[in-house]
Image: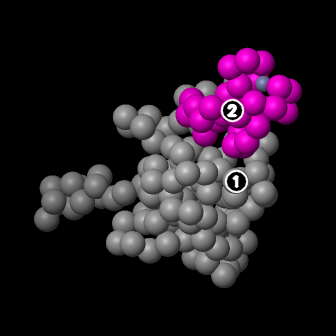
Amino acid sequence: MYFGRRVYNKGVDRRSLLLFLPALHAEAPKTALRGKLVPGAIEQDGGKRVTLAGEDDALAVCNDPRVIGSDFEAEGKMRADGVFEVAPMWQAPLFVYKGGKRLFVTYWCDVCAIRTYTPGICWCCREDTAYEPRDRKD
Ligand SMILES: [Zn+2]
């Protein structure tokens, strides 16, 4: 059925295609993994949990109680052992979705006007930084 087939193709979820790609290549290309953030892992539709690995700074975000429970996305590579390796933090690879928008996970010190990508204290004034998802990097 010509018409029906067109409709079907249009409905293919782009995200499913991205997740399928790593299985086709021994050396996985950079991809994105999206789902609900649970401590140190992303829970996908159906309840499958993919453990996250990466730099300490990335894992600090993935275990931040303020971020846990979010509609979350990490860029990186799916390893052969099924663990998702988050890309280096200088690439700002972590996002949350809010109101249909993809936002960078950032942290902000109001006192010093300094933005970081890792939770914790401000390196300048040593006060706690505020969690502030944002639509651009700088
Ligand atoms: Zn500060």
Q: Are marks 1 and 2 in contact (CB under 8 Å)?
A: no
- In the rendered image, residue 80, in percent from the top left (x then y), is placed at 67, 79
Q: Nearer the viewer, residue 58 or 25?
A: 58
Give the mark nearest the N terminus, 1 or 2: 1
Residue 133 is at least partly visible in this image: yes
The residue type indicated by label 1 comes to: Ala
Quadrant of the image for the C terminus?
A: top right
- In the rendered image, residue 17, in percent from the top left (x then y), is placed at 46, 62
Residue 18 is at least partly visible in this image: no
The answer to whether residue 124 is magenta is yes
Q: Locate ligand 1 by image quadrant.
A: top right
Span of residues in magenta: 105-134
The residue type indicated by label 2 comes to: Thr
Instruction: Using the numbered discs, state the Cα–Cα distance from disc 1 to disc 2 in whole angstroms.
Output: 13 Å
Which residue shows up at 45% across the image and 58% down it? 36
Q: Nearer the viewer, residue 81 or 96?
A: 96
Mark 1, secondary structure of its residue:
helix
Q: Is residue 64 above or below residue 101?
A: below
Q: Does mark 1 have its CB less than 8 Å from ligand 1? A: no
Residue beneath disc 2 = 129
Residue beneath disc 1 = 60
Q: Does mark 2 have its CB less than 8 Å from ligand 1? A: yes
- In the picture as drawn, the residue positioned furthest to the front comes out as 127
- Is 69 on the left or on the right of 107, as rendered? left
Q: Nearer the viewer, residue 130 or 71?
A: 130
> Residue 99, located in which quarter of the rendered image?
top left
Q: Nearer the viewer, residue 21 or 35?
A: 35
The answer to whether residue 21 is magenta is no
Which residue shows up at 33% across the image and 58% down it? 12
